[in-house]
Image: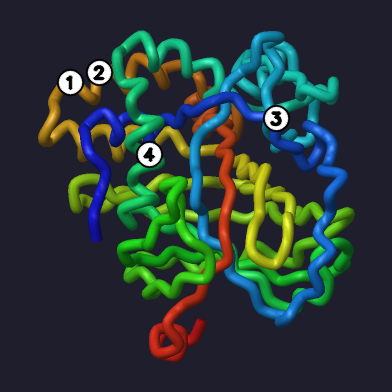
């Protein structure tokens, strides 16, 4: 399996950054597309693989896409969030937890902003293939109960003329497949929402495996049709310990990664306050994505029981 290209990606994968999004949040965000999916579902089982992936920024007005992960609205005096204020979504909804969005300008200042290109390239070479597997899917527009699992695959994807993954490709189940149950999701007006759930996200850089621990994960995406999803957002509290573990492992080959990551992460935790240390053990972040229909090789599914 091909992988990403520079140590910078390892640092930013630990931290996350990408172009701003107007993704609809489970609690807030842009309105759903008027062109709701109308294609009948051919099967009660669907798999969508990410064909674009990135992390969200604050927009020009200081608004942030994401989720209200802790179900409250906090200002800078909230001791429970380690004095980190929440953000407001583009539609005006308060309480958005996305502290990582504030780090993007700092990441760009360190000269590692090329990670956005490298992160996308990792999909196109098969370095990162994350998927949503849906079962019990009866309708693409409105369905009160859909089972969602988060999976990982590997293989070298075929790309279209636009450089993105072609639809309906078949992949192998990854040995690092998290196979996490996202619970019972709901589809309303073409938008699927799922969570919360915990997941250890597999990351591979230069053939080295890393793991980011995402806690209290919430997901929402728009089902365009039987072949595509878009405007996806995945929000979670990323454990500070897994960010630092990734940085330390990456620093074995590039020693200057660790101080960069340490300086960026220090004091940015806003979730899961530790009663013993008084520090917040997680930092909120939001990932944006789109996806296309895909399949697993039947033999792999049988072998893994998936």
Which label is found at residue 60?
none
**Number of residues whose C-alpha sits closer than 10 Å to that of mark 1, classed few (under 14), some (14–19) or many (20 or more):** few
Question: Counting residues from the N terminus, which is met first, the one under dot 4 or under dot 3?
Answer: 3
The reply to whether the C-beta atoms of the residues labelled 1 and 3 are less than 8 Å apart is no
Question: Counting residues from the N terminus, which is met first, the one under dot 3 or under dot 2?
Answer: 3
**Number of residues whose C-alpha sits closer than 10 Å to that of mark 3, classed few (under 14), some (14–19) or many (20 or more):** many
Q: Position of residue 95 (x, y in %)?
A: 77, 25
Query: Of helix, strand and loop, which one carries label 4?
Result: helix
The reply to whether the C-beta atoms of the residues labelled 2 and 4 are less than 8 Å apart is no
Q: Quadrant of residue 73?
A: top right
Q: Residue 130 or 240: which is nearer the viewer?
A: 130
**Number of residues whose C-alpha sits closer than 10 Å to that of mark 4, classed few (under 14), some (14–19) or many (20 or more):** many
The reply to whether the C-beta atoms of the residues labelled 4 and 1 are less than 8 Å apart is no
Q: Residue at x 19, y 46 (%)?
A: 206
Rendered view: 151 above or below 88: below
Q: Residue at x 64, y 42 (%)?
A: 233
Query: Of helix, strand and loop, which one carries label 1?
Result: loop
The answer to whether residue 281 is visible is yes
Q: Position of residue 107 (x, y in %)?
A: 39, 17
Q: Quadrant of residue 265?
A: top left
Question: Counting residues from the N terminus, which is met first, the one under dot 1 or under dot 3?
Answer: 3
Residue occupied by mark 1: 256
Q: Residue 255 or 54: which is nearer the viewer?
A: 54
Rendered view: 286 above or below 257: below
In the image: residue 129, left or right of residue 187: left
The reply to whether the C-beta atoms of the residues labelled 1 and 2 are less than 8 Å apart is yes
User: For the residues carrying marks 3 and 2, which lies nearer the camera in this image?
Assistant: 3
**How far is the residue under mark 1 from the one under mark 3?**
34 Å
**Quarter the N terminus occupies:** bottom left
Rendered view: 77 above or below 226: above
Residue occupied by mark 4: 119
């Amino acid at each position: 399996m091909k992988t990403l290209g520079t140590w910078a990606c390892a640092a930013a994968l630990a931290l996350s950054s990408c172009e701003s999004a107007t993704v609809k949040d489970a609690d807030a965000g842009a309105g759903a597309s008027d062109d709701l999916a109308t294609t009948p579902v051919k099967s009660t089982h669907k798999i969508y693989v990410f064909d674009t992936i990135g992390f969200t920024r604050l927009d020009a007005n200081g608004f942030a896409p994401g989720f209200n992960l802790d179900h409250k609205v906090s200002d800078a005096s909230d001791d429970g969030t380690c004095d980190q204020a929440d953000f407001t979504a583009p539609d005006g909804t308060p309480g958005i937890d996305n502290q990582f969005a504030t780090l993007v300008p700092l990441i760009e200042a360190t000269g590692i902003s090329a990670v956005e290109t490298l992160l996308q390239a990792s999909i196109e070479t098969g370095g990162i293939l994350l998927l949503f597997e849906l079962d019990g899917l009866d309708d693409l527009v409105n369905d009160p109960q859909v089972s969602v699992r988060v999976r990982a695959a590997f293989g070298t994807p075929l790309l279209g003329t636009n450089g993105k993954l072609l639809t309906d490709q078949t992949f192998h189940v990854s040995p690092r497949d998290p196979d996490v149950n996202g619970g019972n999701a709901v589809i309303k007006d073409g938008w699927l929402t799922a969570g919360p759930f915990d997941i250890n996200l597999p990351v591979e850089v230069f053939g080295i495996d890393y793991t980011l621990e995402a806690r209290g994960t919430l997901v929402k995406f728009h089902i365009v049709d039987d072949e595509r999803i878009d405007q996806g957002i995945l929000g979670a509290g990323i454990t500070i310990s897994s960010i630092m573990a990734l940085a330390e492992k990456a620093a074995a080959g590039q020693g200057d990664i660790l101080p960069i990551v340490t300086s960026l992460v220090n004091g940015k935790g806003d979730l899961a306050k530790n009663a013993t240390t008084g520090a917040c053990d997680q930092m909120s972040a939001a990932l944006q994505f789109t996806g296309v229909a895909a399949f697993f090789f039947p033999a792999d599914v049988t072998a893994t029981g998936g």
